[in-house]
Image (spheres, helix red, strand yellow):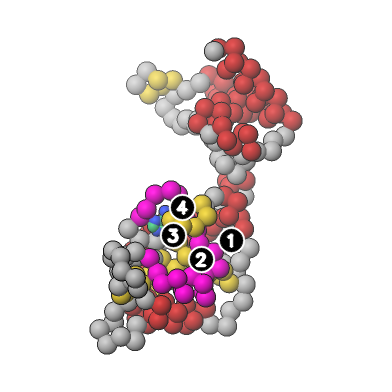
Amino acid sequence: MRFDILTLFPEMTDSIFSYSIISRAMSQNLIEIHSHNIRDYSTDKHRRVDDTPYGGGMGMLMSPQPIFDCHKAVKGGRENVRTIYMSPQGTVFNHQKALELREYDNIIILCGHYEGVDQRVIDEIVDEEISIGDYVLTGGELAAAVVVDAVARLCEGVLSDKECYEKESIAGGLLEYPQYTRPFDFHGLTVPEVLNSGHHANIELWRLERAVEKTLRVRPDLIENGTFDKKTLKVIERIKKEYENQQ
Ligand code: ADE
């Protein structure tokens, strides 16, 4: 999987990916991430990349020419490419979207700045607009990094064990159960006894119960909209009843 990030601040995205799991995946050639400076493609004699909006209004817009040329040069003749524009106007990113994006060979991500980009860019070269949430960032770089990270970790070999992402929070439809490591007693706060019991079935049930409890409390929408196996459904019903009895 290859990611290309079109940005006015390539140092920003490069630095984010120079650590930990993503950096290791790049050195093992499991993924490629390239940042491209849109300004390098400006034909303006002052290398300008922005201008005022037609019709008036606040702020500056990114001009189409440098973006079109940068995109053309980066995309080349490649196929199975998806071009995404990071924008608060897009559909909201989630795990399902990350799974969908993993199917492309190449993802090109355009990062906006100022008041956004000329609409002709969106109409002509962008396949979809993606937002990372209902708030406005100063630019698309952090949002692009979120998408690249979430998709890259789903690529073959990036995480050592597939279970890492198949069983985890959200992917499994529930939030995660609480986890503990040594010491057993920290400042008088001890680890739940069951986790030290060695009884695997009890541990599994305890974890499922805690995951259901947490999800019902924090993200009831995940339970309402999710599909679960029989065992999980039984636990959901039992814990819901316990809640009702408490009220
Ligand atoms: N650019 C600015 N705000 C954004 C957001 N919420 N998501 C994606 N890109 C953005």
Q: How many marks?
A: 4
Which quarter of the picture shows residue 119?
bottom left
| Distance in Å between CA atoms under marks 3 and 1 | 17 Å
Res 84 label: 2
The answer to which of 115 and 8 lies nearer the viewer is 115
Task: Check disc 3 and give the amino acid type.
Answer: Ser
The front one of 145 and 115 is 115
The residues bearing labels 2 and 3 have C-alpha atoms spaced at a distance of 9 Å
Is residue 195 visible from the viewing direction of this image? yes
Circle 3 is placed at which residue position? 87
Disc 4: CA contacts within 10 A as few (<14), some (14-19) or many (>=20): many
Q: Is mark 3 within 8 Å of ligand 1?
A: yes
- 132 within the magenta span: yes
Question: In the shown orientation, is residue 154 left or right of residue 114?
Answer: right
- Residue 16: percent from left, percent from top: 38, 59
- Give the image quarter of residue 14: bottom left
Q: Can you identify the residue that label 1 sits on? A: 101
